[in-house]
Image: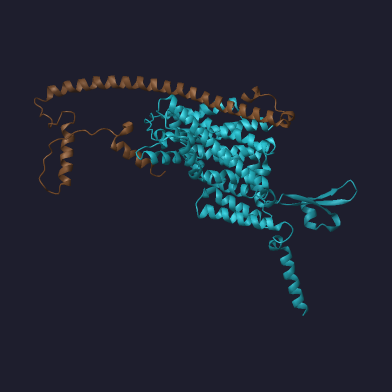
Amino acid sequence: MLTSFLPSIGTELFDDKGMLMAVITTSGILIVFVILLLLIIIFYAYGGIFRAVTASKEKKLAAQKAADDAEKAKISEEAVSAVQPAAPSDDGSIPGEIIAVIAAAVAAMSGGKKYAVKKVSRTQKPTGGRTAWASMGVYENTRPF
Amino acid sequence: MEILHSIWASILSILNESGLLGLFEGEGWKNAIMIVVACFLLYLAIGKQFEPLLLLPIAFGMLLVNLPLSGVMDVPTTELVPLAKASATEIAKYGQVIMPDGQTYVEVAHSGGLLYYLYLGVKLGIYPPLIFLGIGAMSDFGPLIANPKSFILGAAAQIGIFFTFCGAILLGFNAKVAGSIAIIGGADGPTAIYVTSKLAADYLGPIAVAAYSYMALVPIIQPPIMRLLTTKKERAVVMTQLRTVSKTEKIMFPIIVTIVVALLLPSAAPLVGMLMLGNLMRESGVVKRISDAAQNELMNIVTIFLGTTVGATARAEVFLTPETLMIVGLGLAAFCLGTAFGVIFGKLMYIFTGGKVNPLIGSAGVSAVPMAARVSQKVGQETNPSNYLLMHALGPNVAGVIGSAVAAGVLLAVLGK
């Protein structure tokens, strides 16, 4: 028990105000910090172990998935003789399907007018590395507070 | 004419035995003041919604106990009635006692008031740990597990408790009362009640009212201190997202904390143990019914008993003293110091992590879950509207609950001897 390290608190200590304040303040702060620091160390170690275990599992799963994908691709190549190319994107970084969805959204908002999507480019991510969707999610989750 | 005289005599007799007369006799005016104070607290709870779940029963308990002759907190007593004067029922019920003087008496027992019996749950230290059980079942320690550094902020915010202890000693309080006053700085109502019921039960009323009042005033007290101690640049820091915590980690957390804290500081075991039991019931997912009961029915029932009986300890003769004003002042000092030390340690973490930690989350270390975390979020968004500090602040916030329970354990271990 940590408090057993303290000097014995007898009535004589209670009589000396200065000593009482010094002992209680110093030992109190010290014990609270020691216990919570110990918990920090334990939970850092514990978190590290969990992350290592999880990473190892994920690595195995990824390797398994890659092997499965390779096998599937091999089968697909044999089964499909010709594949239509994906819809073109502006710089190749955005999949054609996404551009099609964006074009459809613009069409829906244009009210029947003719339009042409000339360029689709990525905007800079907001600060903190959170996307607009992630920010919206956080906003929704924290709104009750 | 004789009939009228009898009616008048009976009316006078009823008036003489009524509580109304009690307000004008002796120190009855003090009760009248307490009734006004109780009504003001009821207004704060209902009209301003300041911690209404606790302030309302506390204020009503205060009202009940200060109504003269209500007898709600009367202590059970026994009375020796000479055998000749006792009724047959009393003799049959209580039996006869022969006293050393050779006379035979009947020891007639008078029951105590309702709130006296309910108050035993406070006096014996039963209600606060049960409240902690409910808090544990409602708390998510995920942010703390994801960022264990938060424990530092939970510890830093407890420093105010120990400095306030010194202030209380210097103002002339004895060590046990000073410890009870100082724990207000933990901003944790059940902890304050638990420590006070063990160390200085006579001061329960003023200390509980001060503790819950300051918890309700967190959004008013904390922001000026937070702004004063931080720069705009520090307040604008956007913290990186916390890692995902697995279910196994969340299940292991309450078990590990209980073992570590209870082994090192057994006096903190009732509070920390119940907090962690509630959390284990929540995270394990195998006792959903019990977890729901702890969060709802049990929590609500205990809150009613705790609030009403603590309020009923605020009798005029205890509450209307200069010491109450000193307790209110010291409680405020404890709370402000706790907030300040939390922010200062947040600043230290800001410096040592190269600006990755927003110091505003430090103020949440005073517990008062989740109000203090909300305040960190709100003050952070004043500087940067796209900043979401809530989850980061919840780490120190729940660490503060553990920290205040540990601080309570220290005070009980040292002063409770």
Q: Colour of chain A?
A: brown
Q: Position of residue B193 (x, y in %)?
A: 61, 41
Count the marks. 0
Residue at 12% in and 24% down: A79
The chain letter corresponding to cyan is B
Q: Position of residue B261 (x, y in %)?
A: 56, 27
Residue at 55% in and 39% down: B335
In the picture, the quarter occupied by the C terminus of chain B is top right
Residue farthest along the bottom direction in this orientation: B1
Q: Position of residue B6 (x, y in %)?
A: 76, 74
Say if B87 sits above or below B171 in the image: below
Say if B191 sits above or below B354 in the image: below
B254 with respect to B103 (left or right) = left
B235 with respect to A131 (left or right) = right
The answer to which of B29 and A77 lies nearer the viewer is B29
Q: Is residue B165 visible from the viewing direction of this image? A: yes
B53 with respect to B322 (left or right) = left
Residue farthest along the right direction in this orientation: B102
Question: In the rendered image, which quarter is residue A4 located in?
Answer: top right
Residue at 42% in and 25% down: B353
Q: Is residue B291 visible from the viewing direction of this image? A: no
Q: Position of residue B414 (x, y in %)?
A: 66, 30
In the picture, the quarter occupied by the N terminus of chain B is bottom right
The answer to which of B363 and B136 lies nearer the viewer is B363
